[in-house]
């Protein structure tokens, strides 16, 4: 087809009139799944059981890096109750790229790459029988040297983890463990630093953390000899699970039906597969019997996808009056033993995103290490980048005796600012969040001895993505929406509110179901803060399609032109006095007679959603640091963030508070601890210490609304931005309280106490 | 014709050019045209990039229109969590 | 010869019996033998509280107790919290306050909170936080949970 014959579909730049008063949008009704969840009726991944079901257990490598010399599964195969055993070489050969990596991580082929890497699996008639049988599998390993630390893994003498995975942009001569290299920027960096009154540079480090969802991965997989199968699984994205399992096992994706259960947390960690394909492989080997596979907590921590550990250099130039003149960063991140998993690129894009700077330069390295294959964790890369940049900005504010909020307002990105990553910002709400933070009563709270206050800003791009929604009218005038984005934060309620608003019908008359892969077109997972945005947008378009049809039915009944009918308050009306005098035809009336008037009425919409709006946030935290123990107590925590428009304010607040809590854990306690053999030392919740109820105060929230013109109701995704400011905000508060600048997360009592002592001793 | 801003690390594949002009009406055509003009860009683009069109970041939506006055930047690929 | 143990016990006021392996936990027995899947396994080591039930009125992590130990006891799970179709004030308040997001920790927290209010009908915020410190939530940051518990306690005191 010639170039000028292609008719592009314009999705960006659509502008909706978002500044109206709403009847349903912005209210706080009960969520539709609330009853099921408070009574224990809701069914999660491990809550499903079917007839003839077997149970799986997985054997995992105890070594960080080793060659598999031999696997003997004979004793396991002969054990009581065992119906199938699989190992890596049972999976099809010939995969490349991302599919090969997924397959290697599912079951190791000839090498194990991290402590916990799956090596074999058993399906048996009971969970205990499977666990017992797995211990009978004999594996002979040839140990290889390993490397855990990101900077160590780049050194010339570091053990080589994989050969031939170096990306095309990596400079000549770098170690094979360096698999990707990024560089971008604009402006005259040298001139920028020369113009500054103060130039500071420092190195910041963060450790690997896990999303920490309370529900371990769980699925029931069934696969017949004919290559047709089904899976029940807790997931953020059933189509991704289908696609990935099919790739790993050499199946036709359309032959696999994946049904999402309710999900007990994901935060990015359930957008991909880890052991799910094993249940299908075992099922096929066991003659098609369904196989339930539930991970233990230590398997989740050892062998699913934590986020990267990082080593980051930052250099910033600032004038005496607080103007930032230039900034440069070099980020080194490890994403486990496979390429393309470290969030280095995204971290670089976020690093200076909150600032309007004339000169910026970014360099990044994606490095391999003998650690589990990293997965996305809530705004991947952004929290680490914020830790480095916002900490250094704070150091400079302190040295120049400038107010941290004023400096951010002076240099903050606004509409028309050239973003640090290149393009020009459209409407964004950073300034509004800074103003709201500045005006909040928390800023007036008096600070006592050993107490300090920290401020930081954060950012996430948000995402649109492939979305399909269908909406069907019931005979009673109620509406059923089939959506594809699992509800991890209350999005069913938000989608129902938007549908109620668009159709003009009560919220209780809208049902939103999250459906399986066979029932709807493709949907990307609930990730990138896209569910309320993209599913909502597609649902609104589906409503518009149904409205058009309902108006057509009314027009036909009234004998007038279609264009002479309008939809208002849940009914078709003649549009204006010239159209004729007919009483409004309610949705219920149209629905009751739809069979006779032409057939069932539905609306649907498929799109790769454009019109995405970024979400900026400002956090303010007050801490008290005990000078005898180094323990940090959070006294007050304020989250101010731009939601565009809060469809259901309670669930927007929930995202703000949840993101802050994860950030607090990451800043103060959470980290992956390895011994010198590269084995994870803390794969249990006792030692991988996430925040508990007694660690936190109430978390104050302010929802700022700078409506996104790209969405019919002005929605900006909100799920991810909230985790980006806490790391530096808390570091800044600790610096304020103790005079000690912590540059290596987590800021545990041991580390803070050491810093305090070193400072006191000079 | 549209102007595409590349990131500085890609200079070695484009004879030092940071801004490349190609004939295209959609994002997909623009990416294809970049590879035609500079074949060394192919592996980078194949492994995935995000694109900012007039300030809006897009990943995978190759049908989106680009106009002669569109502001277009290639970015590191974005994934959410 | 089977090594299974026959257990007779009372769950949510009903007499029940099941066969279980000596190594099965009470959590396994509730979920797999009695199909009461409200209690969840979040960790298996007694650190997350998602498996919370009460045994003879005492709050326990059912993953730390054996199924066989249920013999002759009275066990209360989330499934028995609503009486005759009427939600407990805590359950109602959790929905009203949006005190849950993914909801997987919710059964354990509700059981724990109910137990607290039976012992102490007028707890301070600090007391609620420390009582619930054994119930991990990763989604909410606990704010709305604490508010819901305090609000339910106030309502229950008013009705008493």
Image (spheres, rainbow, N blue to C red):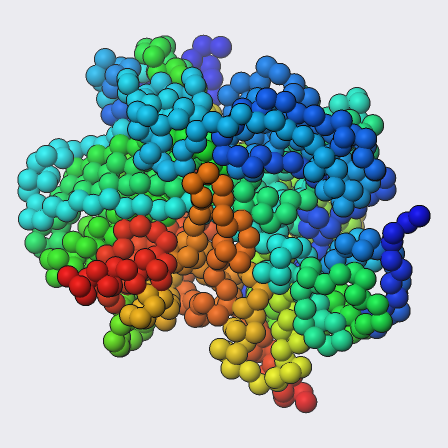
Percent across and percent down for residue A216 are 62, 48
Residue ID at (46%, 38%):
A677
Q: Nearer the viewer, residue B38 or A649?
A: B38
Q: Is residue C154 visible?
A: yes
Whether residue A58 sits left or right of residue A99 in the image: it is right
Q: Quadrant of the C terminus of chain A?
A: bottom left
Residue C106 point in image, percent of width and height: 63, 63
Left or right: where A528 falls relative to A195: right
Q: Quadrant of residue A227?
A: top right
Please give left or right for residue C65 compared with residue A237 in the image: right
Q: Nearer the viewer, residue A337 or A579?
A: A337
The residue drawn where x is 25% and y is 67% is A737
Vertical side of A452 occupied by A421: above or below: above
Give the vertical position of A476 relative to A160 (above or below): below
User: What is the x, y in percent for residue A332?
Assistant: 32, 35
Indicate the quadrant where residue A725 lies: bottom left
Q: Residue visible at 53% across and 58% down? A: A686
Q: Toward the viewer: A741 or A271? A: A741
Residue furthest to the right in view is C1
Q: Position of residue A397 (x, y in %)?
A: 16, 57
Q: Is residue A439 visible?
A: no
Q: Residue at 39% of width from left, 15% of height from top?
A: B42
Q: How many marks?
A: 0
Q: Is residue A450 above or below residue A76?
A: below
Q: Based on the displayed image, in which of its 4 quarters is residue A159 positioned?
A: top left
Q: Is C148 or A171 nearer to us in this picture? A: A171
């Amino acid at each position: 087809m010639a170039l000028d014959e292609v008719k592009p579909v314009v999705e960006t730049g659509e502008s909706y009139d978002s500044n109206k008063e709403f009847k349903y949008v912005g209210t706080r009704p009960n969520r539709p799944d609330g009853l099921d969840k408070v009574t224990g009726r809701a069914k999660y991944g491990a809550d499903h059981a079917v007839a003839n079901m077997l149970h799986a257990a997985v054997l995992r490598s105890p070594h960080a890096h080793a060659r598999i010399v031999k696997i003997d599964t004979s004793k396991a195969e002969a054990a009581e109750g065992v119906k199938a055993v699989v190992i890596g070489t049972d999976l099809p050969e010939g995969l490349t790229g991302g599919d090969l990596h997924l397959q290697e991580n599912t079951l190791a082929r000839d090498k194990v790459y991290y402590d916990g890497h799956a090596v074999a699996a058993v399906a048996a008639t009971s969970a205990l029988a499977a666990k017992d049988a797995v211990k009978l599998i004999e594996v002979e390993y040839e140990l290889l040297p390993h490397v855990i630390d990101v900077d160590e893994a780049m050194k010339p003498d570091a053990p080589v983890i994989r050969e031939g995975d170096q990306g095309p942009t990596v400079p000549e001569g770098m170690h094979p463990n360096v698999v990707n290299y990024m560089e971008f920027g604009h402006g005259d960096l040298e001139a920028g630093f020369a113009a500054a009154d103060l130039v500071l540079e420092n190195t910041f480090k963060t450790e690997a953390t896990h999303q920490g969802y309370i529900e371990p991965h769980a699925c029931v997989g069934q696969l017949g000899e004919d290559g047709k199968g089904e899976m029940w699984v807790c997931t953020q994205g059933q189509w991704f699970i289908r696609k990935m399992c099919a790739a790993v096992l050499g199946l036709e994706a359309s032959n696999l039906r994946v049904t999402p259960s309710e999900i007990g947390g994901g935060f990015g960690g359930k957008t991909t597969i880890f052991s799910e394909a094993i249940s299908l492989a075992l099922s096929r080997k066991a003659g098609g019997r369904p196989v339930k596979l539930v991970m233990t907590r230590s398997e989740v921590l050892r062998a699913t996808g934590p986020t990267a550990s990082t080593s980051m250099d930052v250099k910033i130039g600032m004038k005496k009056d607080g103007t930032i003149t230039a900034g440069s960063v070099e980020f080194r991140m490890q994403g486990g033993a496979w390429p393309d998993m470290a969030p280095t690129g995204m971290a670089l894009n976020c690093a200076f995103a909150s600032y309007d700077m004339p000169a910026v330069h970014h360099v990044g390295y994606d490095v391999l290490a003998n650690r589990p294959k990293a997965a996305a964790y809530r705004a991947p890369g952004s929290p680490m980048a914020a830790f480095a940049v916002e900490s250094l900005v704070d150091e400079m504010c302190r040295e120049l005796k400038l107010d941290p909020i004023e400096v951010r307002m002076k240099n903050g990105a606004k509409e028309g600012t050239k973003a640090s990553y290149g393009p020009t910002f459209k409407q964004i709400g950073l300034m509004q969040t800074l103003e709201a933070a500045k005006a909040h009563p928390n800023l007036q709270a008096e600070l006592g001895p050993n107490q300090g206050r920290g401020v930081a800003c954060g950012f996430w791009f948000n995402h649109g993505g492939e979305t399909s929604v269908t909406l069907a009218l019931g005979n009673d005038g109620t509406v059923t929406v089939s959506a594809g984005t699992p509800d991890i934060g209350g999005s069913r309620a938000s989608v129902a509110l938007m549908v109620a608003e668009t159709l003009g019908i009560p919220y209780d008359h809208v049902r939103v179901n999250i459906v399986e892969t066979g029932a709807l077109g493709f949907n990307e997972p609930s990730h990138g803060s896209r569910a309320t945005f993209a599913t909502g947008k597609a649902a609104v378009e589906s409503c518009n399609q149904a409205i058009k049809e309902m108006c057509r039915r009314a027009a036909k009944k009234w004998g007038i032109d279609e264009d002479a009918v309008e939809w208002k308050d849940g009914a078709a009306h003649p549009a204006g006095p010239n159209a004729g005098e007919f009483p409004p035809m309610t949705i219920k009336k149209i629905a009751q007679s739809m069979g006779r008037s032409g057939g069932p009425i539905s609306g649907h919409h498929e799109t790769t959603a454009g019109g995405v709006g970024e979400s900026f946030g400002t956090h303010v935290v007050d801490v008290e640091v005990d000078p005898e123990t180094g323990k940090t107590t959070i006294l007050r925590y304020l989250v101010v963030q731009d939601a565009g428009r809060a469809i259901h304010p309670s669930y927007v607040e929930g995202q703000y508070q949840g993101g802050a809590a994860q950030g607090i854990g990451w800043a103060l306690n959470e980290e992956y601890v390895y011994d010198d053999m590269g084995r994870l030392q803390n794969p249990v919740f006792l030692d991988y210490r996430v925040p508990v109820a007694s660690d936190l105060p109430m978390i104050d929230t302010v929802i700022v609304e700078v409506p996104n013109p790209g969405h019919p109701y002005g929605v900006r995704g909100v799920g991810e931005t909230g985790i980006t400011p806490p790391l530096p905000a808390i570091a800044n508060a600790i610096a304020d309280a103790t005079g000690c600048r912590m540059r290596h997360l987590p800021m545990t009592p041991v580390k803070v106490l050491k810093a305090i002592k070193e400072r006191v001793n000079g | 014709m549209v102007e595409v801003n590349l990131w500085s690390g890609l200079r070695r594949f484009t004879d030092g050019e940071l801004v490349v002009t190609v004939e295209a009406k959609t994002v997909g055509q623009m990416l294809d045209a970049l590879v035609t003009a500079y074949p060394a860009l192919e592996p980078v683009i194949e492994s995935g990039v995000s694109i900012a069109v007039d300030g809006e970041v897009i990943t995978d939506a190759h049908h989106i229109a680009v106009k002669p006055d569109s502001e277009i930047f290639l970015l590191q690929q974005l994934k959410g969590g | 010869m089977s090594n299974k143990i026959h257990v007779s016990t009372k769950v949510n006021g009903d007499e029940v019996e099941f066969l279980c392996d000596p190594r099965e936990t009470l959590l396994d027995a509730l979920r797999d033998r009695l199909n009461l899947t409200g209690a969840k396994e979040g960790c298996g080591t007694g650190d997350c509280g998602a498996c919370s039930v009460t045994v003879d009125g005492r709050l326990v992590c059912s993953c730390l107790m054996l199924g066989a130990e249920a013999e002759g006891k009275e066990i209360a799970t989330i499934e028995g919290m609503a009486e005759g179709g009427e939600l407990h004030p805590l359950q109602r308040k959790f929905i009203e306050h949006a005190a849950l997001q993914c909801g997987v920790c919710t059964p354990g927290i509700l059981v724990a909170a109910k137990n607290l209010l039976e012992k102490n009908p007028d707890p301070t915020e600090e007391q609620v936080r420390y009582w619930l410190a054994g119930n991990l939530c990763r989604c909410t940051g606990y704010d709305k949970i604490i508010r819901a518990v305090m609000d339910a306690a106030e309502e229950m005191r008013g009705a008493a």
